[in-house]
Image (cartoon, rainbow, N blue to C red):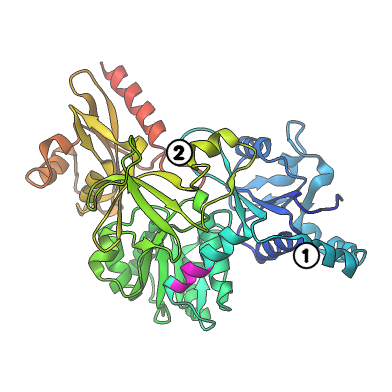
Amino acid sequence: MCQIRKNDLVGVWLTNRFEWVILQYATARLGALLVSINPLWKLTELEDALNVTPVKLIITMKRNEVTKTNHEQLLSNETRKIQKSQVLYLEDGWTYLRDSAANVTDTELSEIENSLQFDDAINIKFTSGTVGRVKAALLSHHNILNNAYFTAVRLGYTEQDRTCVPVSFSHCFGTVCGIHSSLSMGGCLVIPSETFEIEKVLTAIEHEKCTSLLGVPTMFMSILNSLKNRENYDLSSLRTGQIGGAFCPRETMELVLTQMNIKQMTIGYGMTENSGCIAQTFVDDSLERYLSTVGKALDHTEIKIVNQNTNEVVKRGEIGELCTRGYHVMLGYYENETATKQILEPNSKWLRTGDLAVMDEHDYIQVVGRIKDLIIRGGQNIYPKEIEEYLTEHPAVNEVHVIGIPSEKYGEELMAWVKLNSDSRTEPVGEIDLIEFCLDQISSYKIPTHWKFVEEFPRTATGKVRKAEMRQISIKELINRK
């Protein structure tokens, strides 16, 4: 087995397990870089990642029961990018590691620790973008620990809090906002299961008396649906938590506050390149703040909204690109200076998020969409998020995503992909119903011209909707109809 030294890359290809937490702290103390590999990835995605970050060692399990993938067989394939001697399987136990540790002297450990700096890179997280090849964000001690600590401050954590984290540790949300936020305050980290399982999450909250729960909106939707149909769980211990990773519908947030009784739930907004969280609501914010904003910048960080063409700061209430600066901004993309310069201004260290947002007079941020998702129809700028938020208020709609498709007349037309609630399909709901729902509520030019009803959406391994793929599918289907 290879020896791991400072600056070596160690790939961790695991579901949520306690070993993940140990490995994060062990590699950080050693000065090695933990490379977070999504446990849902298959061979092609793994090879793409390893092409970007040539790890010295992969720590994984022989079989992933979540994806039903035989990792041992996959990693012994001739096309793999890593030698067999550089794979450690958890099923083989930790005996070898313990025995090897006996050969490391206290002097060696002391020398390593004395060489470490606060801004050394210790973690690589892969971006979960919906287009293009994967990029590897390089995060430091300073990035992760400060982001985690001030997220915990915003949540009001103390050593008495017990945080339930069903979010994947391969993502910043699970690692930074989950593991490190909890432990930075001396609290208790509760890992309910290796992957998200509703019943195990609810059981963990009840049995462990969890006070905080993290999750993406679809997790909370699933939990709420489960509570309708199953025996009651005692969730009275829950006080706070964080919803992030995607837009949270108004109805879902209202039910979290009322049905789950999490009165101090917060909304978080961030990205991998910002080591987790950029902005967050406060535990005592009003309901309207929860529903319409992502809160304010984390303590001791900066946010500005700029005109994407001139880079000048826009007036309060005007839409522009959200830029941020502070301890949470990544060091850069691993060995990709070109991509780093496109997003991170070299002198000022402002990071361009690619998100369109508005800042109000009280410094609260409302994210209105992605620059690349902006639709221009007949010269009118249309932000899909506004239409998506409105359509999700229809009782039959479970989830909706709006894209732009080419139009000879207007340049672009709107198309809505709609997933209906399962209990709504007995009473047919079609595009006429949804168009009528939009009439007199939103401008006519914002009402989608084309509609597609689906069971699921194309998604990345982290659950983000692939709008570029949706656009390609839609264009092809429309051409075939002609």
3D distance between C-alphas at marks 1 and 2: 38 Å
The reply to whether the C-beta atoms of the residues labelled 1 and 2 are less than 8 Å apart is no
Taking the image as shown, residue 114 lies to the left or right of residue 311, namely right
What is the three-letter code of the residue carrying label 2? Thr
Could you tell me which quadrant the C terminus lies in?
top left
Q: Position of residue 172 (x, y in %)?
A: 53, 56
> Image point 36% across, 35% down: which residue?
372
Question: Residue 152 colored magenta?
Answer: yes
Question: In the image, what residue occupies the spot 42% across and 54% down?
Answer: 245
Of 393 and 222, which appears nearest the observer? 393
Badge 2: residue crowd in 10 Å (few <14, some 14–19, many ≥20): some
* Residue 212 shown in magenta: no
Q: Is residue 298 left or right of residue 371?
A: right
Residue most toward the bottom?
A: 160
> Which residue is pictured at 39% across the width and 41% down the height?
457
Q: Is residue 194 at all visible to an observer of this figure?
A: no
Quadrant hosting residue 416: top left
* Above or below, 184 relative to 73: below
> Furthest-right residue in view?
103
Relative to 30, residue 273 above or below: above
Q: Is residue 273 visible?
A: yes
How many residues crowd around disc 1 within 10 Å: few (fewer than 14), some, or many (20 or more)?
some
Amino acid type, callout 1: Glu
Residue that label 2 marks: 130
Q: Position of residue 380 (x, y in %)?
A: 18, 33
User: Which of pointers 1 and 2 lies earlier in the amino acid sequence?
Assistant: 1
Give x and y (percent) for residue 340. 54, 39
- The quarter holding residue 298 reads bottom left
Identify the residue shown where x is 49% and y is 57%: 326
Q: Secondary structure at mark 2?
A: loop
Span of residues in magenta: 149-153
**What residue is disc 1 on?**
113
